Amino acid sequence: MENEVVVSVRDLRKTYGAKVAVDGISLEVRRGEVFGVLGPNGAGKTTTVECAAGLRRPDGGTVRVLGLDPVADPAVRYRVGVQLQHAVLPNRMKVREAVRIFASAYPRHADPDALLAEWGLAEQHGTAFAALSGGQRQRLFIALALLGEPEVVVLDELTTGLDPAARRDTWSLVRALLAKGVSVLLVTHAMDEAEQLCDRLVVVAAGRGAAAGTPAMLRGAHTSLESAYLALTGEVA
Ligand SMILES: Nc1ncnc2c1ncn2[C@@H]1O[C@H](COP(=O)(O)OP(=O)(O)OP(=O)(O)O)[C@@H](O)[C@H]1O
Ligand SMILES: [Mg+2]
């Protein structure tokens, strides 16, 4: 269904002890789009997408994924792939073991060898996690997020640490996912990535949405998305 909302976050609030990390963020991801979340370090982006993925329980507001509450209805999590910003695997776990273990968690999954080849890890099957480069780890976590053939993918800092060619390849692989009707919730600090990949985005600052819309709408009268972003987040006038 066109314009079908696959992720709905309304007035989300999340605290860690006395710290208010998210203070009323709302967003909607539609089927087949990339929805971007931008904002300074500590603004609440990871907390927001982890709540959206059902990995954290909100203190207030509502989260619906494919029409379901991902905390109350964990089965929906099989339909959501998540690449976490701070993910790690045991140092000695080999790439092939990681994909096998992750694949066993899903009722239905992609072909692990094809997925690893697609993400440039064909030579790394026998490599231990500790021996992977930063960019190889990043690509492994993206591949693991896609293993269950999810309908919705949450990517927290998708291309951080990737070389320029790998970034371009990653963008085209994400576009290929969109063509299949997959929807993406993407956290990024990269303005070029936001402009190239995101259909719509929200800029968050101090746990609140500062502005939302298409990259062109947010750029508005500014010379670049970056200067609009800096003005919105109050980092530079
Ligand atoms: N597990 C936690 N316990 C306590 N405080 C936390 C925890 N996770 C995050 N915070 C705090 O909540 C706020 C939001 O953190 P979050 O990780 O959501 O930010 P972010 O926008 O993803 O930042 P970054 O760009 O640095 O990844 C920060 O002030 C952070 O210190
Ligand atoms: Mg983060």
Image (tube, rainbow, N blue to C red):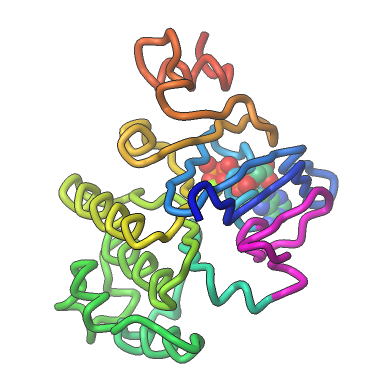
In the picture, measured across the screen, residue 195 lies left or right of residue 17, that is left
The residue under the point 76% across, 38% down is 23
- Please say if 153 is above or below 108: above
In the picture, measured across the screen, residue 90 lies left or right of residue 179, that is right
In the picture, measured across the screen, residue 159 lies left or right of residue 14, that is left
Rendering quarter of residue 196: top left
In percent of width and height, residue 36 lies at 48, 41
Q: What is the count of numbered marks?
A: 0
82 or 123: nearer the viewer: 82
Can residue 92 be seen here? The reply is no
Q: Any magenta on residue 209?
A: no
In percent of width and height, residue 217 lies at 46, 21
The residue at the far front in this view is: 1
40 or 128: nearer the viewer: 40
The residue under the point 52% across, 14% down is 231
Examine the residues drawn in magenta and state their main secondary structure. Answer: loop
In percent of width and height, residue 20 lies at 78, 41
Numbered range of the magenta stretch: 51-73
